[in-house]
Amino acid sequence: TPRERSEHDLPRCRHFGICGGCEMLDLPYAAQLARKQEALRALFAPLDERLASALAVSPSPQIERYRNKAIYPVRPRAGGGVEAGFFRRGTHELVDVRECQVQE
């Protein structure tokens, strides 16, 4: 079964809240599942309420480093080299990401 996070390890990413790559690391895993369940229901409810009620989000055995694909914007760094990361939430400003809790 998935490990329940404690208050002491939420969120564990130093980029959380700045980077737009994820948005639920500050929630315990059970709360993340509940939020995803509600989003799924809201998506399908206008089409078929019975279907929306029947669909269920299944917990994953891997709650960290589960993404196997990501697109990283890359740009030259002043003074040489490059930086890669994710865009700051709601912008096209690059956050130079050094670690990611959801990307392998």
Image: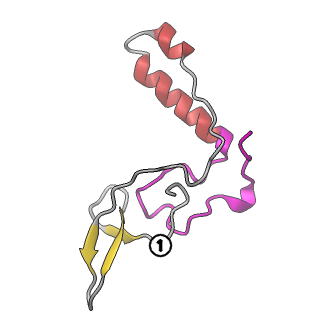
Say if the magenta span includes residue 73.
no
Image spot of residue 24 (x, y percent): 54, 49
Classified by dominant secondary structure, the portion drawn in magenta counts as: loop
Which residue is painted at 74% across and 46% down in the image? 4
Circle 1 sits on which residue? Answer: 98
Q: Which residues are magenta?
A: 1-30
Quarter of the image containing the N terminus? top right
Q: Is residue 52 left or right of residue 4?
A: left
- Place residue 11 in its image quadrant: bottom right
Q: Is residue 18 magenta?
A: yes
Compare residues 4 and 27 and report the one nearer the observer. 4
Q: Is residue 76 left or right of residue 61?
A: left
At x 42%, y 19%, the residue is 44
Disc 1 secondary structure class: loop
Question: Outermost residue, bottom direction?
Answer: 79
Indicate whether 3 appears above or below 95.
Answer: above
Q: Is residue 22 above or below residue 80?
A: above
Query: Horizontal and vertical percent for residue 71?
Result: 33, 56
